[in-house]
Structure formats: C-alpha cells, structure tokens
C-alpha cells in the first residue's frame, strides 16, 4: 500500500489505513510509526497494547504504548478488553509469535478490530524507550 507523505493524510486516507489494518489484522512497523504520529495529531484513534511480561516492557517498550497486559495474566483481564471491543486494538510482543496466537482467540470471541505488529518490537524502528515507566493502565 502506498502511504501518503507526512502532510497528505486526508480523512479518507486515514480511514483506508484503518480498514487495511483491520482487514489484514496486521500492522507493519512503518505503518505503526505513521499511526502513532497520526494519533498525536488527533487524526486516528487506537489502543496500543504490549502483551509481554512486565520485565520485558521495562527493559524496552514502544513510545506511545497505552496498556500492558502480560500474556501470563491476560485471562484475568478479558473484561477490560471487552470494554474496548469497539476500539481498534493493536497488540505487540517481542517477535509477533504471542500476538498471533492472541489474535486467533480474540477473533473467536468476536473481536473484529484487532491487529498485531508484524515482527514485534524487534522489527519496530520507531521511538523506543529503555527503562520505561509502566503505562497508567497496567494489568499485571
């Protein structure tokens, strides 16, 4: 998919991006970088969720992460995810292995606006934070 330049993101282009992400259930590292920038401009809304464990998040995380829901305790917080059912949810882990498994389960539960970062945090070339403070919305 051809991406518009920095200032060319019309409402239609943003909508097309969201539709493409939702349809494929996958976000490339480049697309996530663009989505985070568009979110700071108020042009797109989504929730970025890290499903790695707390020590992994603290060691290195993507700037702009909204929630930490470690896979080891995720089953305890399905109600929290259900409240976000109508939001676009973008999940990431280290390499995309855990998020792929998670997406299959969420789709069986009826979630339609879910995607994962292909290649995980190791593929992401945007801004990352070492020793990041835990996001305000943490479920451990």
Image (cartoon, helix red, strand yellow):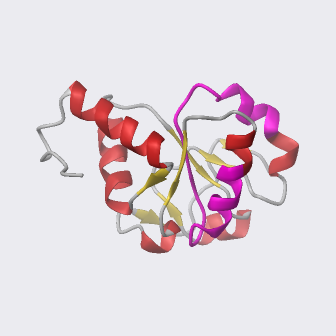
**Residue 6 vs residue 42: left or right?**
left
Q: Residue at x 59, y 71 (%)?
A: 94
Taking depth in this image into account, of 41 and 25 the one nearest to the observer is: 25
Q: Position of residue 27 (x, y in %)?
A: 43, 54
Q: Is residue 50 above or below residue 7?
A: below
Q: Quadrant of residue 78?
A: top right
Q: Is residue 46 above or below residue 62?
A: above
44 part of magenta stretch: no
Q: Is residue 103 above or below residue 8?
A: below
Q: Residue at x 45, y 55 (%)?
A: 63
Q: Position of residue 83 (x, y in %)?
A: 71, 26
**Residue 109 vs residue 49: left or right?**
right
Segment colored magenta: 78-104
Taking depth in this image into account, of 99 and 73 the one nearest to the observer is: 99
Q: Residue at x 63, y 59 (%)?
A: 99
**Is residue 106 among the parts visible in the rendering?**
yes
């Amino acid at each position: 998919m051809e991406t518009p330049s920095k200032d060319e993101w019309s409402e239609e282009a943003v909508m097309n991006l969201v539709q493409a992400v939702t349809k494929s259930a996958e976000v490339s590292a480049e697309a996530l970088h663009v989505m985070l920038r568009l979110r700071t401009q108020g042009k797109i809304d989504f929730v970025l969720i890290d499903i790695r464990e707390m020590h992994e998040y603290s060691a290195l995380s993507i700037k702009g992460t909204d929630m930490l829901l470690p896979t080891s305790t995720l089953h305890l917080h399905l109600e929290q995810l259900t409240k976000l059912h109508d939001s676009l949810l973008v999940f990431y882990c280290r390499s995309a292995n855990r998020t792929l498994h998670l997406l299959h389960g969420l789709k069986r539960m009826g979630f339609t606006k879910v995607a994962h970062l292909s290649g995980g945090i190791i593929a992401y070339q945007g801004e990352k934070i070492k020793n990041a403070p835990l996001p305000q919305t943490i479920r451990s």
